[in-house]
Amino acid sequence: MAQNNLLTLKDVDIAQKRVLMRVDVNVPLDANLNITDDTRIRAVLPAINYALDENARVIIASHMGRPGGKHVEKLSLKPVAKRFSRLLKKDVQFVPDCIGEDVEKIVAQMNPGDVVLLENLRFYPGETKNDDEFAQQLAKLCDVYVNNAFAVAHRENASVVAITKYAPVSVAGFLLKSELNYFERALENPARPLVAIIGGAKVSSKLGAFENMLKQVDKFVVGGAMASTFLKSVDYDVGQSMVENELLWEARSLMKKASMSGKAFYIPVDAVVADRFDPDAQSKIVPIREVPPDWMIMDIGPATALLYSEVLASARTIIWNGPMGVFEMDAFSRGTMAMVNYVANSYALTIVGGGDTDVAIHKAGESHRITYISTGGGAFLALMEGKSLPAVVALQEAAHRTGLV
């Protein structure tokens, strides 16, 4: 996806203007509504600080969770406003709604350098329905619309697609542009060998990514529950492991296509197995040919981790999506954590996104040694599948429509 015609915040005059910035600060909260990880908030600070340096009036808009078009108090963005205030070192006013006359009045009273955060966009059903009327009401709040929410760029939502038809000017934020540039660099003109590590639960969710990446990737490394489907497709007995039996032919076909096109395709040679899906289950390490009939695969084994480390040693570009096992349970986290260390220690350009892989990297304390950690799982996967992102297409069309490119 070429980004040459994607305008950014730096390409337009925002001095003293109302800048509506769509971000994704859908951060995790504990039972007391305290933020437990503010990575997504910190990721959008550079664009907000730039707008403040340019003396703009900044209106921040985001969603939180899936309230289904209704007001759900525990999904309010109020705690996020407090965290923004702390990180920006200035007062960020929380607005208890995101459209309507009261919101318009608050925005009209803003001074240059002020920042407000609107309430959860998804409290209105029009957001997820890409509703034009809802988008028009959002557009009333701004002179310049900035999409800085890569994580929802694959969705046709009003605040990322329909709004671009009504905002006077629509551009990309720094985070969105950076995400797209890194991915383009990794897939369209990579330093080789390019290795893709694909994990997670289901082959079905990654089938399009596998098919598309066969064109660019030199080596595939497979783990997670989906590895069981690949293993069974070539006649290994995987016991009670989760298998997508309807996709056995597709899995076998993928490996055959990779082989015929000279691409290496690695599947586990040993595994950590358990007698049940439970953190306290009885477990042991077995060669992949010796999975007990009544047990299930929970993680890649040490021999597989060593094999994969050798594959990664020669890599010059690594893309990783999805963990190697049930890493949320400590007993079955070693495979994923070993891969985190191998990727962090590699000499390659490393890009990680989605499938809880970013969670594993932060848990291992290795985030500073990864070249780029994507903020968007679904959008990252859509790019891996070779799809255009609706939000990006909308920005490009808006730029042409307004004569900016």
Image (cartoon, rainbow, N blue to C red):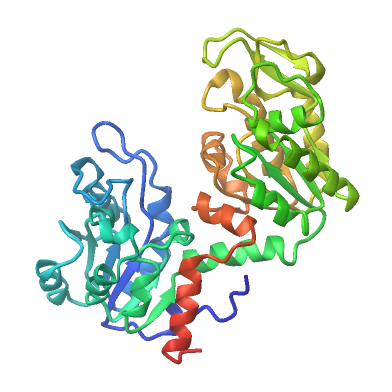
- Res. 50 in view: no
* 92 to 278, vertically: above or below: below
Quadrant of the rendered image containing residue 56: bottom left
Q: How many numbered marks, from 0 up?
A: 0
207 relative position to 221: left or right: left
- Which residue is drawn at the image coordinates 26% and 74% (left, top)? 136
- Which residue is drawn at the image coordinates 31% and 80% (left, top)? 166
171 relative position to 113: left or right: right
* 184 to 64, vertically: above or below: below
Image location (x, y in percent) of residue 200: 60, 36
Q: Nearer the viewer, residue 322 or 38?
A: 322
Image location (x, y in percent) of residue 44: 41, 60
Q: Nearer the viewer, residue 214 or 283?
A: 214
Q: Nearer the viewer, residue 83 or 357?
A: 357
* 334 to 354, vertically: above or below: above
123 relative position to 280: left or right: left
- Res. 60 in view: yes
- Which residue is drawn at the image coordinates 39% and 67% (left, top)? 160
